[in-house]
Image (cartoon, helix red, strand yellow):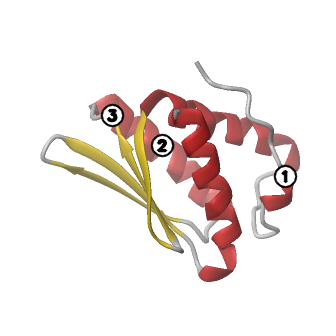
């Protein structure tokens, strides 16, 4: 079940074109994904976040669909979904000027996944 993690909209970048009213809904979708399928969170470097996901075709499709929609409104994100050897990982990269957004995403993923 998704935890109730407050939405601190101060980290939402001005580059985001998602209407303000829809932003809490999108954050809730990410929180649900994090709570349901994230097994581990790692930060290989300052501008990259790696999420190890529970392997399944449904989880891969869910992550791909959500990150595809997110990339439509926040084009500064680079999402890479890797399926290999029975594992599933989502890597999120941002330009240096968007590190604060990645920090917030890491915090939410860690909190939601327990």
Q: Position of residue 91 (x, y in %)?
A: 41, 59
Quarter in which the N terminus is drawn: top right
To which residue does mark 2 refer? Answer: 65
Q: Earlier in the sequence, mark 2 or mark 3?
A: 3
Using the numbered discs, state the Cα–Cα distance from disc 1 to disc 3 in whole angstroms: 28 Å
Image quadrant assignment for residue 59:
top left
Q: Residue at x 40, y 44 (%)?
A: 40
Label located before the other in sequence (2 or 1): 1
Q: Is residue 98 above or below residue 31?
A: below
Front-lying residue, 8 or 56 = 8
Q: Mark 3 — residue?
A: 54
Residue situated in front as seen by the camera: 75 or 35: 35
Tag 1 residue: 9
Instruction: Return the mark for residue 58.
Output: none
Mark 2–mark 1 contact, CB under 8 Å? Answer: no
> From the viewer's perspective, is the residue at label 2 or at label 3 nearer?
3
Q: Nearer the viewer, mark 2 or mark 1?
A: 1
| Above-or-below relation of 60 to 50 | above
Q: Is residue 25 left or right of residue 84?
A: right
């Amino acid at each position: 079940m998704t935890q109730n993690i407050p939405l601190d909209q101060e980290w939402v970048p001005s580059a985001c074109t998602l209407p303000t009213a829809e932003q809490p809904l999108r954050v809730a979708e990410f929180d649900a994904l994090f709570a349901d399928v994230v097994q581990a969170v790692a930060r290989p470097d300052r501008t990259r976040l790696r999420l190890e996901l529970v392997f399944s075709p449904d989880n891969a499709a869910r992550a791909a669909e959500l990150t595809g929609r997110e990339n439509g409104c926040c084009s500064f994100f680079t999402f890479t979904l890797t399926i290999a050897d029975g594992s599933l990982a989502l890597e999120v990269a941002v330009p240096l000027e968007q590190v604060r957004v990645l920090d917030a995403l890491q915090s939410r993923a860690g909190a939601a996944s327990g």
